[in-house]
């Protein structure tokens, strides 16, 4: 049966041979679209759209050789924007792509400042601009916004007369609506829009799209907020104030947007190594693609449903618990609620019927708490104080019970198991010196606590005030910290002098041997040839604007350079690595 199935007259091998002999590979890969039917002719030149292993591409085959033989075909990748919108794939647009490919780009005109040529070219990631000719000194390349470089907004109709006055009718630039004036403004980026608080606001285009830069902090510039080449000072200052200045004091590092609160914790959108993601406590969910341009538009209920679905799958992996031979320690008492939490528990049922989401309820609770007077807060402060005293008493009993359990388990000796409550410290030791920042926080915590409800908000506000503190005011706290350090050293010296029984002397280790301090450090392993190459070339890796690339991008570029390096240069680094290795072994 198997022999007949594979080798029979109608078997698998015969069918494969029939397909190879009768089906043309190019014809099988060709995409037959209605807008391209007019292209299927017997003319000397054939233009078509094909599907390849790396995506769709345009191919043009010419039969006009001297001996009437088929010459090597010319191919060009189809830009991603056209691949996503079939209505942009017409005979005119494919001809424009091939004309740009064959002519090494289309010429838009001359730059008014230096007279160099500006070209529009197509690359693997779409369209881009080149200022200067190939091989000319000082030639630079410049990216375009995503909607332009991907050709998503390709003009499907006839070009206007204004676009074609230079004889570029049917060109790729005219279909994109890209004029010489606009191209000059793109190649002139980055540009300073205005100044705010004596610091410039810079607009430009980076690897992830248009952005605004202020005080070494970047924010994305969405299309709805304005164009990178035309955004004005007032709009830029408004966006920077909301997206950079205010956000620094409201959210943590890496947080792109706060969606709302669920079960007492905030649902946020954060920026990670592999893109934006939704975060709640320790659960992370990939951000849906339709919200990448503006993460703040993610509905809270949709984000919560994704988080719940991820939680059902098991959530983050947890390390398996190791078996412990130590005693079973009872759980400690629950920490007491603060005055703010007691206030929230009392007012939350009343506000739950007025607001639809938990985030709105939490914001209203924060507003009500900030508006309460000291007299109105007093009952909640008293309840919190009572709860704290009860907690301290329960904690004291729990410590005594825990110490008794440990003592029984270890037979009166010292337990070696982990997770055991440590013994009490020597109460005679002097209090460690406080830093200038801690002294500043102690002096301003009471004032800041009146305007902010949670400990996290208070800490963020204190950190913001400390960062904005001038040198004169900061010097006062640095002097106080220096005095406190002198106090600590004095009390420590007095305690050592009064230590008659040697209770403060350093203890020996459990093995009976003293730990050695200092001593020769172990030799550092010699670097490899690749590491020596990276060390000598890392400082040369910069972007088109002369700025350093990120560590992952720099590593990729160095790896590519190492793969393409010639044998003579590679041999120099290998010889250097070998000599350092011999010195290390010796």
Image (cartoon, rainbow, N blue to C red):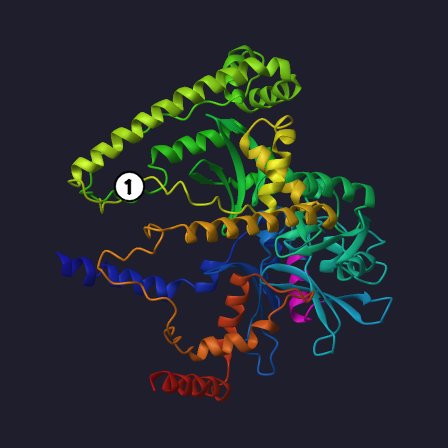
- State the residue lying farthest toward the left: 1
The answer, for residue 325, to whether it is visible in the render is: yes
Image-based side of 372 in relation to 414, left or right: right
Residue at 82% x, 50% y is 194
Residue at 64% x, 65% y is 543
Vertically, is 249 above or below 336? below
The image quadrant where one finds the N terminus is: bottom left
| Span colored in magenta | 93-105
Image-based side of 60 in relation to 223, left or right: left
**In the rendering, at what x and y percent does residue 494 appear?**
47, 51
Residue at 44% x, 33% y is 306
The image quadrant where one finds the C terminus is: bottom left
Image-based side of 411 in relation to 368, left or right: left
Image-based side of 549 in relation to 390, left or right: right
List the residue tagged with mark 1: 419
Near-viewer residue (82 or 371): 371
Vertically, is 24 above or below 319? below
Vertically, is 446 above or below 94? above
Dominant SS of magenta comes to helix
**In the rendering, at what x and y percent does residue 350 appear?**
54, 10
Question: Was residue 173 drawn as part of the magenta stretch in this picture?
Answer: no
Near-viewer residue (493 or 135): 493
Question: Was residue 96 drawn as part of the magenta stretch in this picture?
Answer: yes
């Amino acid at each position: 049966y198997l022999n007949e199935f594979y080798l029979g007259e109608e078997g698998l091998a015969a069918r494969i041979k029939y397909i190879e002999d009768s089906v043309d590979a190019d014809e099988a890969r060709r995409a037959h679209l209605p807008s391209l039917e007019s292209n299927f002719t017997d003319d000397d030149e054939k233009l078509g759209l094909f599907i390849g292993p790396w995506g769709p591409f345009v191919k043009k085959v010419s039969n006009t050789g001297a001996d009437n033989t088929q010459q090597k075909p010319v191919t060009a990748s189809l830009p991603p924007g056209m691949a996503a919108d079939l209505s942009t794939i017409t005979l005119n647009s494919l001809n424009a792509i091939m004309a740009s490919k064959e002519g090494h780009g289309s010429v838009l005109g001359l730059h008014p400042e230096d007279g160099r040529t500006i070209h529009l070219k197509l690359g693997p990631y779409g369209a881009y601009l080149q200022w200067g000719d190939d091989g000319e000194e000082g030639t630079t390349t410049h990216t375009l916004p995503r909607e332009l470089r991907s050709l998503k907004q390709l003009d499907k109709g006839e070009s206007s007369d204004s676009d074609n006055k230079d004889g570029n009718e049917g060109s790729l630039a005219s279909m994109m609506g890209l004029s010489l004036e606009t191209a000059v403004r793109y190649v002139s980026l980055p540009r300073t829009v205005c100044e705010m608080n004596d610091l410039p606001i810079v607009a430009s285009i980076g690897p992830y799209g248009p952005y605004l830069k202020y005080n070494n902090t970047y924010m994305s510039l969405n299309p709805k907020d304005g164009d990178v080449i035309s955004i004005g000072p007032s709009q830029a200052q408004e966006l920077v104030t909301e997206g950079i200045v205010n956000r620094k004091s409201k959210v943590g590092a890496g947080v792109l947007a706060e969606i709302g609160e669920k079960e007492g914790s905030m649902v946020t959108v954060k920026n990670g190594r592999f893109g934006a993601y939704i975060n709640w406590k320790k659960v992370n969910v990939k951000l849906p693609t339709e919200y990448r341009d503006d993460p703040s538009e993610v509905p809270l209920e949709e984000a919560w449903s994704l988080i719940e679905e991820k939680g059902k799958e098991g959530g983050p992996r947890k390390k398996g618990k190791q078996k412990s031979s130590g005693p079973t320690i009872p759980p400690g008492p629950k920490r007491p609620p603060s005055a703010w939490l007691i206030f929230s528990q009392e007012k939350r049922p009343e506000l739950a019927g007025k607001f639809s989401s938990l985030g709105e309820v939490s914001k209203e609770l924060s507003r009500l708490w900030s508006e309460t007077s000291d007299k109105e807060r007093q009952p909640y402060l008293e309840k919190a104080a009572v709860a704290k005293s009860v907690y301290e008493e329960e904690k004291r009993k729990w410590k005594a019970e825990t110490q008794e359990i440990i003592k029984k388990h270890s037979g009166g000796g010292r337990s070696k198991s982990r997770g055991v409550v440590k013994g009490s410290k020597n109460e005679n030791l002097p209090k460690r010196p406080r830093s200038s920042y801690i002294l500043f926080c102690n002096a301003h915590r009471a004032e800041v606590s009146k305007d902010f409800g949670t400990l996290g908000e208070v800490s963020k506000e204190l950190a913001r005030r400390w960062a904005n503190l001038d040198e004169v005011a900061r010097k006062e706290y640095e002097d106080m910290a220096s005095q406190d350090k002198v106090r600590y050293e004095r009390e420590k010296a007095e305690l050592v002098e009064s230590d008659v029984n040697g209770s403060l002397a350093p203890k020996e280790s459990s093995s009976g041997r003293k730990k050695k301090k200092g001593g020769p450090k172990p030799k550092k392993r010699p670097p490899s040839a690749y590491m020596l190459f990276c060390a000598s070339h890392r400082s040369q890796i910069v972007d088109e604007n002369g700025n350093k690339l990120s560590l992952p991008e720099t590593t990729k570029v160095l790896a590519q350079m190492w793969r393409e390096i010639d044998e003579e240069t590679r041999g120099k680094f290998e010889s250097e690595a070998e000599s350092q290795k011999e010195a290390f072994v010796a």
